[in-house]
Amino acid sequence: MALTGYDMERLADEQYKNRIITVSVYCGNCGYNLRMLPYIHTCPECGNQYNARPLKMKGIFMPHETYFPASDVAAVLLCAPVAFVLIRGGIKTVDQGRLILGGVFGVIMIVFMVQAYSRLVRFLKARALARRIALEEFE
């Protein structure tokens, strides 16, 4: 009988279920320090469910999200004028090729906008949490 990925995850969770976090790990929702709490539990401050097991890290503050998503914003700012120029030129000259290419760039721009928005929201939340964590560690 072979173990599936789900079985492996469940077994790994079982191993960490009764262990205590010995380092500073912060809740991804409110920034509460989860040190001395079980690896798999809920945050006592906000009720966020977390799993601090290595390779899982669900519901945990990730400091790498505190960087501004410049590449996503730049992609939107590059695709938008290209799409606009192609569509405008296609309408003026009644060129279907330009219209199609402009539509493709427009769709790509919308995809980048959605991605940039979600990363920007995560960035703002992570930055606020990082400030709160820094203030609490300073005290």
Image (cartoon, rainbow, N blue to C red):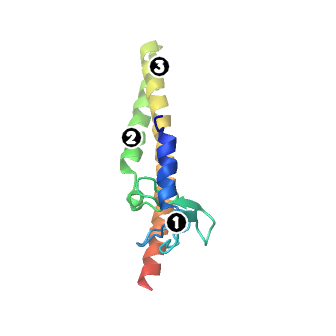
Q: Residue at x 38, y 40 (%)?
A: 75
Where's residue 121, x and y in %? Answer: 51, 54
Q: Considering the numbered disc 3 on the image, is that residue within a helix, a strand or a loop?
A: helix
Q: Please tell me the numbered disc located at residue 75.
A: 2
User: Which amino acid type corresponds to the residue marked 3 in the rendered image?
Assistant: Leu
Q: Residue at x 40, y 62 (%)?
A: 63
Is residue 61 placed above or below 44 in the rendered structure? above
Give the labeled residue for mark 1: 18
Q: Residues within 10 Å of mark 1 (few under 14, many from 20)?
A: few
Q: Residues within 10 Å of mark 3 (few under 14, many from 20)?
A: many
Dividing the image into 4 quarters, which one contains the C terminus? bottom left
Q: Residue at x 42, y 25 (%)?
A: 86
Q: Nearer the viewer, mark 1 or mark 2?
A: 1
Between disc 1 and disc 3, whose residue precedes? 1
Q: Considering the numbered disc 2 on the image, is that residue within a helix, a strand or a loop?
A: helix
Q: Residue at x 51, y 42 (%)?
A: 6
Give the CA distance from mark 1 to mark 2.
Answer: 45 Å
Give the CA distance from mark 2 to mark 3.
Answer: 20 Å
User: Which amino acid type corresponds to the residue marked 2 in the rendered image?
Assistant: Ala
Where's residue 106, x and y in %? Answer: 48, 30
